[in-house]
Image: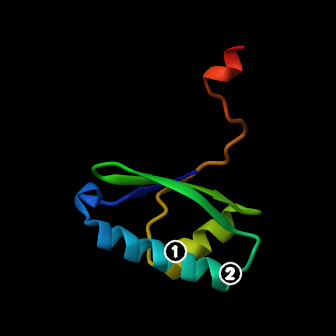
Amino acid sequence: MIERNMPNVGNLSAADLQQASRTSCDTLRELGPEIQWVHSYVTDNKIYCVYRAPDEGMIREHAQKAGFPADSISQVRSVIDPTTAD
């Protein structure tokens, strides 16, 4: 899980978000199949991104090459949801 501090990112237009998405995907293609973008959550001032990668270094390389911040990177150990209670 990547936390990207990006002031006012929630105000970006659909076209701006599409361009950011393209930039990310282009960089992912350059880096190869070991790193994959799953999805992202855009809030007012941050983007939280879920990626699959072999290590933090590859996540940081993607961020650097794509020009995105990667302020915090945390490895997800488990996923739970309401069905976990059953």
Query: Relative to residue 7, is residue 58 drawn left or right?
Result: right
Secondary element at tag 1:
helix
Circle 2 Cα neighbour tier, 10 Å, few/some/many (<14 / 14–19 / ≥20): some
At 68% across and 81% down in the image, what residue appears? 31
Q: Earlier in the sequence, mark 1 or mark 2?
A: 1
Q: Tell me which residue sits at (46%, 71%) in the image.
A: 21
Residue at point 67%, 66% (across, down): 36
User: Tag on residue 31?
Assistant: 2
Q: Position of residue 49 (x, y in %)?
A: 52, 55
Question: Could you tell me residue 39's position as x and y percent?
Answer: 54, 56
Tell me the quarter of the image containing the C terminus: top right
**Direction from residue 16 to residue 27 in the image, left or right:** right
Residue type at numbered disc 2: Leu
Q: Does residue 8 sit above or below 33 in this rendering? A: above
Amino acid type, callout 1: Ser
| Mark 1 vs mark 2, CA separation in Å | 11 Å
- Residue sitting at 65 percent across and 85 percent down? 30
Q: Which mark is residue 6?
A: none
Circle 2 — which element? Answer: helix
Q: Describe residue 33's horizontal placement relative to residue 81 as left or right.
A: right
Within the image, what quadrant is residue 51 found in?
Answer: bottom right
Residue 42: x %, y % from top left? 38, 52
Instruction: Indicate whether 78 appears above or below 65.
Output: above
User: For residue 24, which numbered disc appears in the image?
Assistant: 1
Mark 1 closeness class: few <14, some 14–19, many ≥20 residues within 10 Å = some
Q: Nearer the viewer, residue 49 or 19?
A: 19
Question: Where on the picture, by quarter, is residue 83?
Answer: top right
Count the labels in the image: 2
